[in-house]
Amino acid sequence: MTMINHSEDDESLTKPLGRCSVFYYGIGHMLNDITSACWFTYLLVFLTDIGLSPSDAAVVMLSGQVADGLTTIFAGELIDRFGHFKVWHIAGSLLVAVSFSSVFGGCLPCKLIGSDSAMLQTIGYSVFAAIFNVGWAATQVSHMSMVNCITLNSTSRVVLASCRNAFTMVANLSLYAVAFVVFNNVGAGTPAAVENQYRWIAYISIFIGSCFVVVFAIGTREPRLKLEAHVKGYVRISWMYWFKKILYHQVALVYVLTRLVTNVSQAFLAFYVINDLQMSLSSKALVPAIIFVCSFVVSILLQEIKWTSQRLKGFYTAGGLLWVLCGIGILLLPRNMNAYMYILSIFIGIANALIMVTGVGMQSVLVGRDLNGCAFVYGSLSFMDKMICGVALFILESYQRSTPELHNCSPSYHFFSLNRYALGLVPAVCALLGVIVTCSMNLQTPILVPLEEPLLG
């Protein structure tokens, strides 16, 4: 009788997930995603607009990235030990909601002390950036590692990642819609007015994201697989188990390179379209919006595919090579042809979706049924992502002050500024390296069961 029940449990856990389960999981990262979009797209622009030097702005971002990276390790270890994904998710979301408004809401220590010195501003913004990223990391690790404990069905795991990525695009689009309205209706003549602009963006973003977190908390149950693992007393998998696997290091490298592509390009996109291409201010919202619309559509379409290891590798390779072509276009695009940036945005959006969905899908293949170490995998990979991205952005932003002015250059001349290198060359090189590593992987083909309720059906 026990054998029959065990067999029935395994069978139910390998069945494909229904549409509602996928939807409820997919919306659970919306608060993180909408605040992250604001963080990477507008933080450096905001800080330099209110008077901080590029190097001080880079320090603020680096402090947040370091806090995020360190928290992912601790959160992953504690989740593996004690479980309770939803508790971590809700606690992290609360911390994000409370602290994010202070990141863009003005320097609180400056107001308390009555001083606006550059050092005090840098310290003040850095503290709240770190607090925000601690909550962000706790939410991210709990949500990502939850995938492998919701189902054993490998196709459903990729579908969950794809749905999560689709709602990441919804979150980004929501941010850019809000930003577009705010930038066109709220004046920005002084640093105080700039703070007011971004304060409105932050408040509205927090409200939108929090609504989705509430729906996620109501609609998603604590993963059954993790609960069963604790009841049966499964031994926690040690870190060395993962470090000895070549596939772990390959997947980690691909994930970090993928995040470098998306984060660095997102952080310098606004600088590029405004300073290099000299497009209208509304393009700060319109160009990213096009990218995320295309990413959203592709992410939805990817949910209908029956995934194998070869398809994961093939789609990642296609996305990576497409980004290389986009990077070349960004490097060579002259100012008098800036309208072509809208066309490039379409292909960037497609490439981003392809590499993000398949990159996260590779993590699920790596974890497989080793559920008592899944949070460490996601936490450690996120740690590497945050630290390396933080250092990369810090270095690039520190050199931005030395970039020459472009106003005297011919409109038909594609001047190779730091913004062009950061948006075109760096992501293209990272994407190419990701493709090379992906092609060298030996991914085990998962057991496939077709999706029971196609999301486009």
Image: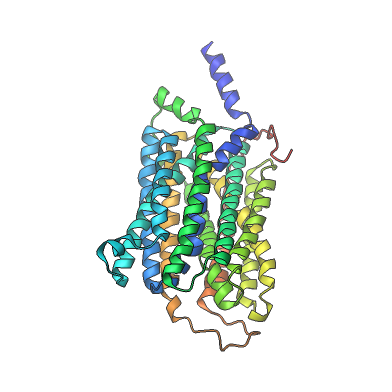
Q: Is residue 120 left or right of residue 219?
A: left
Location of residue 269 in the rendering, given as x and y in whole percent from the top left corner:
55, 68
> On the rendered image, what quadrant is the N terminus found in?
top right
Q: Residue furthest left?
A: 113
What residue is rendered at 49% in x and 44% in y? 210
When asked about the image quadrant of residue 51, the answer is bottom left
What residue is rendered at 36% in x and 70% in y? 56
Q: Nearer the viewer, residue 47 or 255?
A: 47
What residue is rendered at 53% in x and 19% in y? 6
Q: Nearer the viewer, residue 200 or 48?
A: 200
Location of residue 415 in the rendering, given as x and y in whole percent from the top left corner:
58, 82
> On the rendered image, what quadrant is the C terminus found in?
top right
Q: Is residue 283 left or right of residue 60?
A: right
Q: Nearer the viewer, residue 402 or 433?
A: 402
Q: Is residue 135 above or below residue 49?
A: above
Numbered marks: total: 0
Location of residue 291 in the rendering, given as x and y in whole percent from the top left corner:
63, 60
Residue 247 visible in the current orientation: no
Location of residue 177 in the rendering, given as x and y in whole percent from the top left corner:
60, 58
Q: Is residue 75 left or right of residue 321?
A: left
Q: Is residue 149 above or below residue 115?
A: above
When asked about the image quadrant of residue 77, the answer is top left
What residue is rendered at 27% in x and 61% in y? 112
Residue 326 visible in the current orientation: yes
Q: Nearer the viewer, residue 130 or 80?
A: 130
